[in-house]
């Protein structure tokens, strides 16, 4: 019964969304406040209906109602409660329902916090938001109904893929989707602005914080996934340039560009049409990402063709949404009034350069991800595009970006003095070169990978450059006595920038070091034997079976010493789940300042030993710390009072509580 | 299995990649390093974008052994690669070769960047030409009232 309520609520939500997609738009055209005013309540009702539906599915999972096919296929009574709940979005239908729920949540946010928006803009944006909802509701109702029943109901379910039964991955999809769908806000407002034919500061003041919200969530989502891969896949890698990863990385790149160009719209009333373009691009890539992972097209064009219903539906959705928006853009964007002038060497110019590089990066990832499909479809032969391609094309593209990133914030608006800026960065440049030189020396010249010294130099350049800019802002060296007060009065958005840029510097250092100097040892190890990696001596003292709630773990114990002194006891495991019967590896990781000590235990081999993999992954904690600092930077920036002017008082609460709620 | 994961589409999903078995590894660490680096460039043909070094599929294991045999027989990296490509085609290379059918792939990023720069250049030129930017449209009465209200709220 509850499942039917959920299904019915979705159908009602479709009706409401259709209404919301049409009436306010018409009202805005006729400037009829009543018709426009319908958008707000409609979005509230729509959210409530979708929420009921989501709650119904969650209920079915929590009580293990196996008469619902979706629950039967993805759950089991033995699962811990957390994974019963996360099982809701651990499958195609449920994750789409989550997508729609989050979309409705953002619609709700517009009507709750958008009290100060111009009524026409608000009505149109909500109508656009509803159009997206209509598309996805049609998709779920016609091709992916999560409430389908089974008769007779089976005794127990098939269980959730054990790889998904992990805290990191339980929260990965909601964060990712909050990010993806968060860009719908910028998108809806971009389309609304195109319909209206104007982009003003009120527009930018609304779009900027919401883009930031989406960016923070997307960053969290990507990092959670990467972190999971790092500890769960058992060999210390953290990024694979896998199509599914790329699908989330492309909107991140476009969203980051959007974040920066929205600043120019807000402060200088320039780059409007470019910002609109990026808003469409960011959400378009989010949709594309959803399409890529949902349609099966990634696996192969043929898999897609053999079961095309879902794929064709979502491809159609994609074509209408992206094609329609860009067509509208082509028609309307030229009529957008251009605002403030600026010279190429200026803050605006630097942000524009960031945009070009970010967009090129997104384009490169897109090309690499889709090329095998094109090659296959146009008979150019089967091609694989893997990590070696992305590393050799994408990474060099980001070098000029990081070089410019330290200098950009020093530039003044409108017109800057490049020589003056570089003069102020002289010391930082010197230190970065020294750092690169020292790295080169320490890794024994040509013995190490040649790019490692460059990576560390870049990280130092960005980190110190960012700190130098902050120090100059608070006049740390010129007037140290006042510096604290100045730091306190520094706008939160400026703090956010400093933190996010410094976080990226930490990330670059960690990524460089872990890729360049990972040390590993793979061997067959008998109980009692010791192996030394990077100065850490791992003695395998015990391997025994440990019973978990729905798995058996073969758990190894390593006594790890360093220079003869005890360092840690590490207990990696290999789990075998009962339902479905699949193995997972649980690495044991002990973080130190200089890197992670990482141990994995594998199968028993015929002569009584165990396959063990022992690693030292240098500076990996810096990567996670860097990502965390970036996210904190985003949150600090969100708390800036200027971000609330466009949507005051209530939006303030909204901007702050949103992240906490997730 | 991998396909199932992709269908789930939950971001970064891959098999627990406990690939190379200690028994396969070459005794000479320099040769083994070469084999690993080569292996990272070769695709496990039955997997979803995994290199043979990362995959625990049987085919990947066979290919790892082939690569090691070839290396031990004294062939250069390029010769080993050619040996594998001759048997499996370009599909086995994770870094596609630069040739007419992959021109778009390799030059695309540069084309994107070039396009971006041209667009920026055109943007500045247009700006330079119109030295006299139109003054922003004056506020309407309603907008003025709103502005006042907003400013008051700020205080």
Image (cartoon, coloured by chain):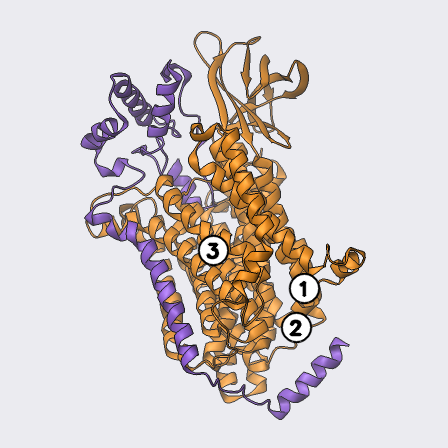
Chain colours: A orange, B purple
User: Callout 1: helix, strand or loop?
Assistant: helix
Q: Position of residue A656 (x, y in %)?
A: 69, 60
Q: For marks 2 and 3, give the CA distance.
A: 26 Å
- Residue A328 appears in view: yes
Q: Position of residue A453 (x, y in %)?
A: 49, 37
Q: Is residue A94 above or below residue A434?
A: below
Q: Nearer the viewer, residue B126 or A475?
A: A475
- Residue A99 in the figure: left or right of residue B125: right
Chain identity of mark 3: A
Q: Are marks 1 and 2 in contact (CB under 8 Å)?
A: yes
Badge 1 and badge 2 both on one subunit: yes
Q: Are marks 2 and 3 in contact (CB under 8 Å)?
A: no
Label 1 belongs to which residue? A654
- Residue B91 in the figure: left or right of residue A80: left
Label 3 belongs to which residue? A253
The residue depicted at 24 percent of the width and 44 percent of the height is B98
Q: Is residue A36 above or below residue A146?
A: below
Chain identity of mark 1: A
Question: Residue A647, labelled with which disc?
Answer: 2
């Amino acid at each position: 019964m509850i499942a039917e309520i959920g299904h019915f609520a979705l159908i009602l939500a479709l009706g409401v969304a259709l209404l919301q997609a049409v009436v306010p738009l018409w009202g805005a055209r006729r400037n009829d406040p009543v018709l426009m005013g319908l958008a707000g309540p409609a979005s509230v009702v729509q959210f409530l209906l979708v929420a009921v539906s989501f709650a119904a599915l969650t209920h079915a999972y929590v009580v293990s109602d196996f008469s619902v096919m979706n629950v039967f296929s993805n759950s089991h009574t033995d699962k811990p409660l957390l994974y019963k709940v996360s099982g809701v979005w651990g499958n195609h239908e449920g994750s789409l329902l989550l997508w729609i729920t989050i979309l409705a949540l953002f619609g709700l946010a517009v009507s709750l916090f958008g009290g100060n928006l111009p009524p026409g803009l608000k009505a149109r944006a909500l109508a656009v938001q509803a159009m997206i909802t209509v598309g996805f509701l049609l998709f779920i109702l016609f091709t992916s109904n999560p409430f389908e029943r089974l008769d007779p109901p089976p005794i127990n379910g098939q269980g959730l893929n054990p790889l998904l039964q992990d805290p990191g991955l339980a929260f990965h999809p909601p964060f990712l989707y909050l990010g993806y769908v968060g860009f719908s806000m910028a998108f809806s407002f971009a389309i609304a602005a195109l319909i209206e034919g104007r982009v003003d500061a009120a527009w930018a003041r609304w779009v900027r914080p919401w883009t930031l919200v989406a960016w923070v969530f997307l960053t969290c989502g990507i990092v959670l996934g990467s972190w999971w891969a790092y500890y769960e896949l058992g060999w210390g890698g953290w990024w694979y340039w896998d199509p599914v990863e790329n699908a989330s990385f492309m909107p991140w790149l476009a969203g980051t560009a959007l974040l920066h160009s929205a600043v120019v719209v807000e402060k200088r009333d320039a780059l409007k049409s470019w910002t609109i373009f990026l808003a469409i691009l960011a959400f378009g890539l989010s949709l594309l990402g959803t399409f890529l992972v949902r349609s099966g097209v990634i696996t192969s064009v043929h898999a897609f063709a053999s079961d095309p219903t879902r794929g064709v539906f979502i491809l159609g959705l994609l074509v209408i949404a992206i094609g329609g928006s860009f067509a509208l853009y082509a028609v309307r964007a030229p009529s957008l009034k251009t605002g403030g002038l600026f010279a190429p060497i200026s803050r605006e110019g630097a942000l524009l350069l960031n945009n070009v590089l970010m967009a090129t990066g997104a384009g490169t990832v897109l090309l690499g991800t889709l090329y095998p499909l094109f090659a296959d479809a146009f008979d150019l032969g089967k091609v694989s595009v893997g990590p070696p391609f992305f590393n050799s094309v994408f990474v060099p593209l980001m070098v000029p970006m990081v070089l410019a990133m330290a200098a950009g914030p020093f530039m003044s608006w409108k017109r800057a003095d490049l020589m003056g800026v570089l003069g102020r960065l002289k010391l930082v440049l010197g230190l970065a070169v020294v750092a690169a030189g020292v790295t080169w020396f320490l890794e024994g010249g040509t013995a190490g990978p040649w790019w490692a010294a460059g990576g560390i130099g870049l990280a130092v350049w960005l980190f110190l450059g960012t700190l130098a800019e902050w120090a100059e802002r608070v006049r740390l060296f010129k007037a140290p006595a006042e510096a604290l007060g100045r730091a306190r009065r520094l706008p939160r958005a400026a703090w956010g920038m400093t933190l996010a840029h410094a976080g990226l510097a930490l990330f670059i250092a960690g990524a460089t070091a872990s890729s360049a100097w990972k040390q590993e040892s793979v061997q067959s190890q008998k109980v009692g034997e010791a192996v030394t990696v990077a100065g850490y001596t791992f003695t395998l003292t015990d391997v025994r079976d440990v019973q978990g709630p729905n798995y058996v773990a073969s758990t190894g114990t390593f006594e790890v010493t360093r220079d003869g002194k005890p360092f840690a006891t590490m207990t990696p495991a290999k789990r075998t789940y009962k339902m479905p019967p699949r193995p997972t590896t649980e690495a044991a990781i002990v973080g130190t300042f200089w890197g992670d000590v990482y141990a994995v235990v594998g199968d028993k081999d015929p002569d009584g030993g165990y396959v063990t993999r022992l690693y030292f992954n240098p500076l990996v904690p810096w990567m996670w710390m860097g990502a965390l600092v970036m996210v904190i930077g985003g949150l600090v920036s969100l708390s800036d009072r200027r971000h609330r002017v466009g949507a005051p008082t209530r939006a303030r609460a909204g901007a702050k509580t949103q992240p906490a709620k997730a | 299995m991998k396909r199932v994961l992709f269908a789930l589409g939950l971001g970064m999903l891959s098999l627990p990649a406990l690939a190379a078995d200690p028994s396969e590894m070459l005794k000479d660490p320099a040769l083994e390093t070469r084999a690993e680096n080569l292996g990272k460039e070769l695709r496990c043909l039955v997997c979803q974008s995994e290199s043979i070094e990362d995959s625990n599929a049987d085919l990947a294991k066979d290919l790892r052994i082939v690569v090691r045999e070839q290396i031990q027989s004294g062939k250069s990296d390029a010769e080993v690669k050619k040996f594998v490509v001759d048997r499996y085609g370009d599909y086995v290379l994770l870094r596609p070769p630069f040739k007419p059918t992959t021109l778009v792939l390799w030059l695309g990023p540069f084309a994107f960047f070039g396009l971006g720069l041209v667009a920026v250049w055109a943007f500045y030129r247009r700006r330079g030409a119109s030295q006299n930017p139109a003054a922003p449209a004056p506020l309407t009465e309603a907008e003025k009232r709103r502005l006042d209200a907003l400013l008051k709220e700020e205080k």
